[in-house]
């Protein structure tokens, strides 16, 4: 089947998509967007989180055919050209990136939180990131990054 989807604001097309193919596979292997990571393939780790019509989803759980004529925004699509999104900048500045496998999903989840709650409390941050697993950082640097991103976003006009 052919899938037509808008990815990061750009109309894209993929041919010969098979029935059981996931959105994650479509993004990584067919469209060349490796930001979302393939970790558990069961929706348990959050490494593959992307926006689907402005809602965060685990792309490993979404069938590629379900995105026909819809909008997907990946971690790559958060940046504005060469300028990183404040959440991406904060993850780098706070040292919240170690192996990097969980980072794309955490960045998308944090971005979504800050779009909804500009000044989240620590419990709100923890709740928003609860679906994203990290085996390296111990989470404190990740929490620091979200706090820093909230601070920086609040300072921008």
Image (cartoon, helix red, strand yellow):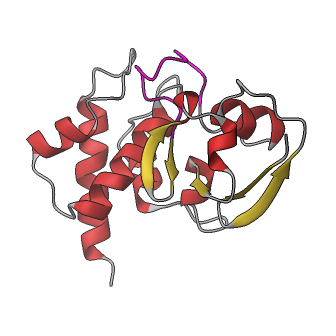
Where residue 116 sits in the image (x, y, percent)?
A: 26, 61
Q: Residue at x 68, y 59 (%)?
A: 69
Outermost bottom residue: 157
On screen, residue 74 versus residue 13, left or right, reads left
Identify which residue is drawn at 72% across, 27% down: 21
Q: Main secondary structure of the magenta part?
A: loop
Q: Examine the image and state in which quarter residue 123 appears.
A: top left
* Residue at 57 percent of width and 28 percent of height: 60
Indicate the position of residue 153 as horizontal and vertical percent values: 31, 68
Query: Where does the magenta region start and end?
Result: 37-49
Label count reads: 0
Towards the viewer: 78 or 157: 78
Q: Is residue 54 above or below residue 22?
A: below
Q: Residue 48 in magenta?
A: yes
Indicate left or right for 10 with 47 as reference. Answer: right
Residue 105 placed where, x, y %?
46, 37
Give whichever of 148, 19 is nearer the camera: 19
Drawn side of residue 63 relative to residue 146, left or right = right
Q: From the image, which quarter does the C terminus lie in?
A: bottom left
- Quadrant of residue 71 within the rendered picture: bottom right
Q: Nearer the viewer, residue 15 or 111?
A: 15
Q: Is residue 132 inside the magenta stretch? A: no
> Which residue is at a point 85% across and 40% down the rendered structure image?
1
Q: Position of residue 62 (x, y in %)?
A: 56, 34
On screen, residue 156 above or below 6: below
């Amino acid at each position: 089947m052919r899938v037509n989807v808008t990815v990061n604001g750009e109309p894209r097309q993929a041919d010969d998509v098979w029935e059981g193919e996931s959105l994650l596979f479509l993004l990584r292997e067919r469209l060349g967007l490796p930001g979302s990571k393939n970790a558990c393939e069961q929706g348990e780790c959050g490494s593959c989180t992307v926006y689907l019509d402005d809602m965060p989803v685990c792309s490993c759980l979404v069938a590629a055919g379900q995105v026909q004529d819809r909008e997907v925004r990946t971690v790559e699509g958060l940046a504005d050209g060469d300028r990183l999104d404040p959440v991406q900048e904060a993850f780098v500045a706070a040292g919240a990136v170690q192996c990097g496998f969980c980072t794309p999903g955490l960045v998308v989840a944090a971005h979504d939180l800050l779009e909804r709650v500009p000044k989240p409390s620590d419990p709100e941050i923890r709740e928003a990131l609860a679906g994203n697993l990290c085996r390296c950082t111990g989470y404190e640097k990740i929490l620091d990054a979200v706090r820093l991103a909230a601070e920086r976003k609040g300072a921008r006009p």
